[in-house]
Amino acid sequence: MSSIPLSFEFFPTRSEEGRRKLGITRKQLSQYQPEYFSCTYGAGGTTRAGTLQAIIDIINDGVAAAPHLACIGASSEEMTELLHTYKQMGIRHIVALRGDVPSGVGFGQQGLRYAYELVSLIRQEFGDWFHIKVAAYPEFHPQARSAGDDINHFVRKCQAGAHSAITQYFFNADSYFWFIDEIQSRGVNIPIIPGIMPIASFSKLARFSETCGAEIPRWLRLKLQSYADDTASIKALGLDVVTEMCAQLLSQGAPSLHFYTLNQAGLVSTICQRLGY
Ligand code: FAD
């Protein structure tokens, strides 16, 4: 069994039935002895209660929990209050993000604007209590003015006190290694953990990739597209491509893998098993 640590990301559920199913997914993924389970947070506090509940459920499973926190439009007081709650629960990991403004919602000029401000706030208020993870974009953030600008902002976020970063998903390992070289040449040496997206459906993946700026290489896109509604073939190709990329990342020094599970254990579990976990 590989000893390189794994982590798994979930999103909060909206119903008791969803919560029950997520409990089963977590149980299945617990067998890989994850370093932690994380749970996303809706910008503007839209999932505040749901994220908190999911974090409580993770702790009750006996696994370390890493709540995500998205700061855009939130006040420092609001963020600090939630962080105090997490500290009282014994939580040591936070994924600190800006988040995206939900469409139709205006936050105006008030509140925190960028993730580096949240990182500074956490360090200022809580010192070293939390291990702060931030987001990294090997293929660059979709709103960045330029690649150089995005790297500058990432470096600033690290200088504000981030301990490690999880990347947006990608299907081209070179972008990850290039990103590492670039930030190391700027004196940033924190662990950069590849975020891994299993491929379950082409249309959903294409839509999401368009929004978040992740590139599906042309050959892969056309091949997936050619399978149309044949989900078995889509999943089979996705498993081969993603597992091969994970193996390459691990053999070339990735410190850990973070899986975007979409609250499903099946594909992620197969990838882990194929990797020898
Ligand atoms: P930032 O680091 O603040 O960067 C955002 C943009 O602003 C970039 O283009 C950057 O170049 C630019 N920028 C940064 N600083 C400055 C500055 N000083 N001046 C001008 N421009 C600047 N979203 C959620 O809502 N909830 C989640 O739980 C969540 N989890 C995520 C987990 C991971 C691992 C990843 C990779 C993303 C996640 N996201 C989540 C999505 C994320 O919130 C969005 O990608 C968001 O658009 C950017 O967040 P950030 O923390 O990277 O922002």
Image (tube, grey):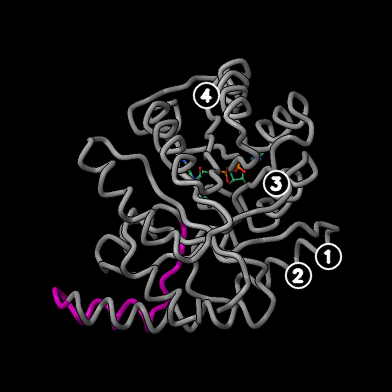
- Residue type of the residue flagged with mark 2: Asp
Asked if residue 264 lies left or right of residue 70, the reply is left
Asked if the residue at tag 4 contacts the one at tag 3, i.e. Cβ–Cβ closer than 8 Å, the answer is no
10 Å crowding of disc 1: few (<14), some (14-19), many (20+): few
Q: Is mark 1 within 8 Å of ligand 1?
A: no
Marks 3 and 4, the one that precedes in the sequence:
4
Residues at marks 2 and 4, CA–CA distance in whole angstroms: 33 Å
Dots 2 and 1: beta carbons under 8 Å? yes
Determine whether the beta carbon of the residue marked 3 sits less than 8 angstroms from the nearest atom of ligand 1. yes
Compared to residue 147, the image places residue 224 above or below, namely: below
Q: Which residue lies furthest to the left in this view?
A: 229
Q: In this view, does 104 lie to the left or right of 60?
A: left
Question: Which type of secondary structure does the marked residue at label 2 adopt?
Answer: helix
Q: Which of 108 and 249 is in front in this view?
A: 249
Give the residue at x 55% y 30%: 71
Q: Magenta stretch containing residue 252, yes or no?
A: no
Q: Name the residue under label 3.
A: 153
- Give the percent coordinates (x, y) of residue 242: 44, 77
Mark 1 — residue?
Answer: 185
Please state which of the two labelled residues, at mark 2 or mark 3, is closer to the viewer.
2
Check disc 3 and give the amino acid type. His
Give the quarter the ligand 1 occupies.
top right
**Which residue corresponds to mark 2?**
181
Amino acid carrying label 4: it is Gly
